[in-house]
Amino acid sequence: MGQILRTIAVLPGDGIGPEVTRGAVELLQDSAATFSHRFEFREFPFGGSAIDQCGDPLPAETLAGCKSADAILLGAIGGPRWDALPLNRRPESGLLRLRKELGLYINLRPIRLRHSLQGISPLRADRVSGCDIEIVRELAGDIYFGEHELHGENGNARARDVAAYTSAEVERVARYAFERAAARRQHVTSVDKANVLSTSVLWRQTVSSVAREFPGVTLDHLYVDNAAMQLLLRPKQFDVILTSNMFGDILSDEAAALAGSIGLIPSLSRGREGLPALYEPIHGSAPSLAGKDVACPLGAIFSATLMLGESFGLATEAQHIEAAVDRMLDSGYRTMDIAEPGSRLLRCSEFTAQVRHEMRDALVHSERYGWGV
Ligand code: IPM
Ligand code: MG
C-alpha cells in the first residue's frame, strides 16, 4: 500500500462541533500513523464562532483553506447566541455559501442500522433490521437558494421564498443517485411533490429521462408525504432515495431516527469529480449538550471514515476504524443518546479513547496475523 499525503481542512464550528470533530481527527491521525500515510490538518473558524471572531460566518481565509484542501471535515454550526441575526448573516448562511462556493450539489446521507443498535430503533426489529438506505439530497438549488423576503410588520407582513430548479441541476444529481444504486441494490426511489409543485414536475420528468441511461436500475416515484409515511411503515423497501434539497433535509432526519439516533449519521457533500468534498455529521450543534462532553462522536467519526473511503480511496483504513467501533458497540459501550439499560455509558472523549484502544488492539493482532484476519 503506497503512502499518501492529504490535506484536510477542519472546521469545528459551534456547540458540540469542536468536541465531536476532535475525536474524528484523533482517529484519522491514528489511522495515518498505522498505515503510514501523512494527513495534514488545517483548522479554520466557521459558523457562529467565526462571526464572533471576525464578523463573518465564512471568512475569506476559511473559504480559501477549504478550496485548497483535499477534503473538509466540518463539525456543526449555529446556536441561540446568533438566532436574532438576519437570515443572511447567521451561521447557517455561512454553510449555504460554503456549499455554493465549493459547487457541492450532491449530498449523500447513508442510513444503516447497525446490528448492535437494533434495540434502540423506534421501529420493531422485524420492520427495520437490515435497513440500509442511501439518501441522495440535491444540495445547491431549490427553495434554499431562491430569493428570501420578509417585508412589513404588525399584522401586515408578507414573506416569500422562491423554489427553483433547472433540468441540468436535477440531471447531475440524479445521475449520481443512479450510479450509487447501480453499485448497490439497483433501486432508486425519487421523492417529489409533483401533484402540486412545478419544480417537482420538472424533477420527475428529468429523473425519468436520466433513468433511461440506467436500464438495470428500477425507478419509483413517491410523493413526499407518502415517502415520509413509507419510511416508518416499510423502510426496507428503500435502496437509494433521490430527492430535492428541502425534502432531503426533512426526510434524512426522519430516516436517521430509524438507525437509532441522529448522532450516528455522517454525510458527504460533493461537486464535480476531483474537487474537495465536505464531510459532516448531519446533526446540529446541540447547544444544550455543548461543553459537557456527553455528545455522540459517531456522526463525526463515520464522516471521517466516509472521507477515507470516498475521497482518498482508503477502504481498508476506513474499515479498520469502523470495525473497532462495531466491536465497542457489541461490547455495550454507548454514549448517552444511544444507551440502553445495562449499557456501559461513556462520555464523548472516553468513547473516542476507547475506539483508539480497540484500534491498537486490532493492530497488534494484524501484526501477528495480517490484515483481514
Ligand atoms: C443540514 C442542516 C442544514 C440544512 C442547516 C444547518 C442549514 O439542517 O445539513 O441538514 O438545512 O441543510
Ligand atoms: Mg438538516
Image (cartoon, rainbow, N blue to C red):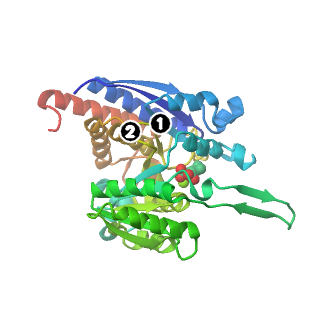
Foreground pick, 366 / 330: 366
Q: Is residue 65 positioned above or below 286 on the image?
A: above
> At 51% across and 36% down in the image, what residue appears?
19
Q: Is residue 126 positioned above or below 320 on the image?
A: below
Three-letter code for the amino acid on which mark 1 is drawn: Leu
Q: What percent of the width, then of the height, locates residue 76?
A: 55, 42
Q: Which quadrant would the C terminus be assigned to in this image? A: top left
Q: Is residue 281 positioned above or below 41 on the image?
A: below
Farthest residue to the left: give it.
Answer: 369
Q: What percent of the width, then of the height, locates residue 298?
A: 41, 44
Mark 1 — residue? 73
Is 159 placed left or right of 334 in the picture? right
Q: Which quadrant would the N terminus be assigned to in this image? A: top left
Foreground pick, 288 / 232: 232
Label 2 element class: helix
- Mark 1 or mark 2: whose residue is earlier in sequence: 1
> At 41% across and 42% down in the image, what residue appears?
303
Mark 2 — residue? 307
Farthest residue to the bottom: give it.
Answer: 195
Ligand 1 has an atom within 8 Å of the beta carbon of the residue at disc 2: no
Q: How many marks?
A: 2
Q: What percent of the width, then of the height, locates residue 226?
A: 47, 75
Q: Is residue 277 positioned above or below 9 on the image?
A: below
Label 1 element class: strand
Examine the image and state in which quarter residue 355 appears: top left
Using the rendered image of the protein, determine whether residue 122 is visible from the camera's viewpoint: no
- Counting other residues with Cα less than 10 Å from the Cα at mark 2, is it few (<14), some (14-19), or many (20 or more)? many
Is 50 placed left or right of 322 in the picture? right
Quadrant of the displayed image that contains ligand 2:
bottom right
How far apart, in angstroms, are the residues tagged by discs 1 and 2? Answer: 8 Å
Foreground pick, 332 / 156: 156
